[in-house]
Amino acid sequence: MRLKNIKGAKEKILKSPYIISNPKEFKGKYQTVFKNENQIHLEIGMGKGDFIINMAQKYPNINFIGIEKFDSVILRATQKLENLKLNNLKLIRFDATLIEEIFDKEITTIYLNFSDPWPKNRHEDRRLTSRKFLQRYDKIFKNTPHIIQKTDNRHLFEYSLKSFSDYNYKIKNISLDLHQDEIPNIETEYEKRFASLGYPIYYLDTKK
């Protein structure tokens, strides 16, 4: 369920020190934002930020960037960060279909957590694991493309497996019920909800 629009959300998020308001200016030089040479991991569709905030806290030697399309959603993430000081986390309000406009050969890992499945065939190109998106990702990965996906949608999961395979990715780890397997995991807000309802969480870790 999409969060309702919050009045003044756009103006509010720009006040957060975690927001990069001019991401195109840093294309190819995000290391200067973090002031170090650590890896940069990217979550596309970060939602309210539970996952990426917890990842940044757990892994201080990795830089994290979260992208979210909707102002009212990213606002919730900035509110959670108000009393935290994480030098390895930045957030960007941006549409992932234009992702190659703000990054260039500098991302080590991409996280795709509970992405919109876009179930209709005519919307295939909008899926974040479609060939069209995998081609976009090629332009932003620094070295070996590395994608980690979680979803509760079986059809999207099966589609993604085939899409990755057809695009020469190799599956490094996979689970048909993540919470029953011994795989390190930080939950998203959606994941907590789905798991509480008894839905299996599908997971895959893949490299090209």
Image (cartoon, rainbow, N blue to C red):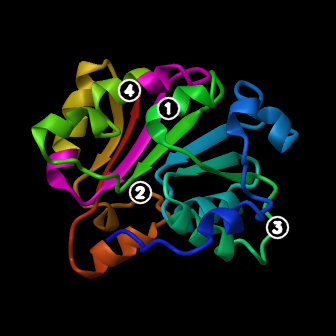
**Quadrant (top left/top right/bottom left/bottom right) for the N terminus:** bottom left
Do the numbered discs 4 and 1 sit on residues whose CB atoms are within 8 Å?
no
Q: What residue would you read off at disc 2?
A: 183
> Left or right: where does residue 1 sit relative to residue 93?
left
Q: Amino acid at mark 4?
A: Leu
Instruction: Indicate which disc, 3 or 2, sits on the residue closer to the N terminus.
Output: 3
Name the residue beneath numbered marker 3. 85
Query: Mark 4 or mark 1, which has the lower sequence index?
Result: 1
State the CA–CA distance, disc 4 to disc 1. 13 Å
Reply above or below: 196 against 160. below
Magenta stretch: give its range: 136-156
Q: Position of residue 136 (x, y in %)?
A: 45, 24
User: In this figure, which residue is indicated by the disc labeled 1?
Assistant: 98
Q: Nearer the viewer, mark 4 or mark 1?
A: 1
Report helix, strand or loop for mark 1.
helix
Q: Is residue 11 in sight in this rendering?
A: yes
